[in-house]
Image (cartoon, rainbow, N blue to C red):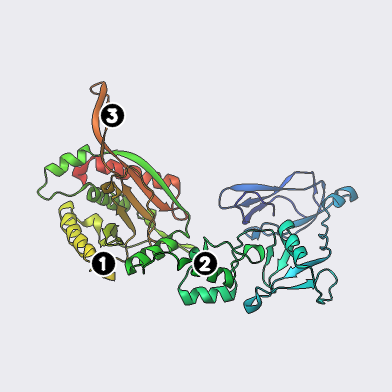
Amino acid sequence: MPQLGESMAEATIVTIHVKPGDQVKADQEIIEVETDKAVMGVTTPCAGEIAKIDAEVKGTYAVGAVLGFVEANDADAARFRKTAPEQPQGSVAKEVPGRQEESAEPVQSGNGSGSHFQVDEAAVRSLSAGSNVQVDAGGGLPVPAGAKGAGYISPRVRARMAELQLTQADLAGISGSGSAGRVTVKDLENFLNSLEQHQAEGASAIRTGVADAMRRSWTRPLATVGVSVCLDPILEDRATRDTKPGPALYALRALALALAENPTAAARLIGGRAIRSESIDIGVAVEAQDGIMVPVIRAADKTSLADLTSRYTELVDLARRRRLGAELTSGGIASVSNFGTFGLDWGTPIPLPDQTLLLGLGAGKKAPSWSEEKQQFVPVTQAELTLSFDHRSLDGGGAGRLLKRVTELLANPAQL
C-alpha cells in the first residue's frame, strides 16, 4: 500500500482489476483504493506477471502493507530489493529507566553479547549530539538521539508530577538535560526551586478549572471562520421591545435556530460515532471573578427572546456570585462569547471540551457600506462574527454555511 496522501495511514480496497497470471506494464493501475479523502489508484512498480494478490475487496490495509506480488525480471527485482540497514559501529549509551535514569550505562552495540564496558563521557555526548543513532530506552520505543525536547517522560518524573499535581504543559518551559532532551527529575526539581525566587500565590479553583478545560479542549484540531454582520436591524428591533436583549442574545437565539435546522453541525465525534443532542442547549460565557463561567440556557430554540433575556439575567447574577451548580453549566452543545464588550473586534475563542462550537461576537463599530438604492456609501454598525469549531466534527464548508445562516437570521430579527 503506497503513501497516497500526506496524512494517509490506511486505505480500503474498492476494486482489483487483475488476477494471478495477468501481464502488466510499469505504472499500470491495478487496484482502486478509498481513503478518507478520495478514491485513488495503486499502480505496478514495474512490468511483469501478477504472481499473487493478497489483498481483498473491502479490506482495509495500512500504508506499507503487502497487497500482492509481481514476477519481474532480474534487473527490476534488483531495483526493488529491500536491504537491511547497517548496524551502528562502536558503542551507544543505554538509558536505564526509573530511578537510574540519570546514570546511564553504556553497552556494546552490534556484537549481540550485551557485555558492559567503560566509555569516555565526552565521546558519548558527542555521539548523542552529532548522530541519529537510536537509543533503546530500556526496552521501550526507540527515541532518536538527536531529537531535542522528546516527549518521553520517565515513570519517576511522572510520579513526581502527580505528587505535585503538575501537567505536561507545566514542563513546557523546562530545558531537559537528559538523553534526547528529556526532562529528568533533577531538571524538574531545579525548575521548581527557581520558582521560589518569584512572587506567587495559589490559583483559585475557577482559574485552575478554566485552565484544565482549555488544556483538554486544545487536544482537538480547532479552527475558526468569521464574517462581518450588520447590527442595525438588531438595534432597531431592540428599540421596539419592552425587554432589551443585548446583541449577544440575538446571536444566541440565531445560533439556536440555525442548529435546530441542522443539528448535526453540533454533533460530538466520540470514537467512530457522531453523538447528537436531543435538545438545543446553548451556553453563554460570563466573566466571573478570576475566570469564566458558562451557564447553559436549555432549549434555546424554543425560548423567545423575551424569556431568554430574563433567564440570561438570572444566570449572569448566579455566575458572578459563583452560585452556578453543575446542573446549570453542563450539557450544552455550543456557546456564545461576547468578547466585543471588551472593545475587541475579532477573536478565536476556544470551545469547551464537551462542546463542538463557540460563536463569538466582536464590538459594533460604524463603517461605510455601499447602498445600491442610494448609489453611495452609507454608515452602518458592523461587528465581526466568528465561529470556532472542532474540525473533526465539522469542515470549513459546513461551518461557513452555519455561520451564513446565523447572519441571515440576524438580518431579519423579526424571525427570532
Q: Secondary structure at mark 2?
A: helix
Image height of 204 relative to 30, above or below: below
The residue that mark 3 highlights is 369
The residue that mark 1 highlights is 328
Crowd band around label 2 with a 10 angstrom C-alpha radius: few (<14), some (14–19), many (20+)? some
Q: Which is nearer the N-term, disc 1 or disc 2?
A: 2
Left or right: residue 35 versus residue 391 is: right
Which residue: 17% across, 61% down? Answer: 314
Q: Secondary structure at mark 3?
A: strand
Q: Label 1, label 2: how many angstroms apart (C-alpha)?
A: 40 Å
Q: Which is nearer the N-term, disc 3 or disc 2?
A: 2
Crowd band around label 1 with a 10 angstrom C-alpha radius: few (<14), some (14–19), many (20+)? some
Image height of 345 relative to 280, above or below: above
The residue that mark 2 highlights is 191
Choose top left, top right, bottom left or bottom right for residue 228.
Answer: top left
Left or right: residue 335 versus residue 150 is: left
Q: Is residue 67 visible?
A: no
Which residue: 73% across, 58% down? Answer: 132
Which residue: 34% across, 59% down? Answer: 333
Choose top left, top right, bottom left or bottom right for residue 205.
Answer: bottom left
Q: Nearer the viewer, residue 59 or 295?
A: 295
Crowd band around label 3 with a 10 angstrom C-alpha radius: few (<14), some (14–19), many (20+)? some
Q: Nearer the viewer, residue 384 or 23?
A: 384
Choose top left, top right, bottom left or bottom right for residue 134.
Answer: bottom right
Q: Nearer the viewer, mark 3 or mark 2?
A: 2
Three-letter code, disc 3: Ser
Q: Label 1, label 3: how many angstroms apart (C-alpha)?
A: 41 Å
Q: Farthest front residue?
A: 197
Q: Secondary structure at mark 1?
A: helix
Q: Position of residue 198 (x, y in %)?
A: 43, 64
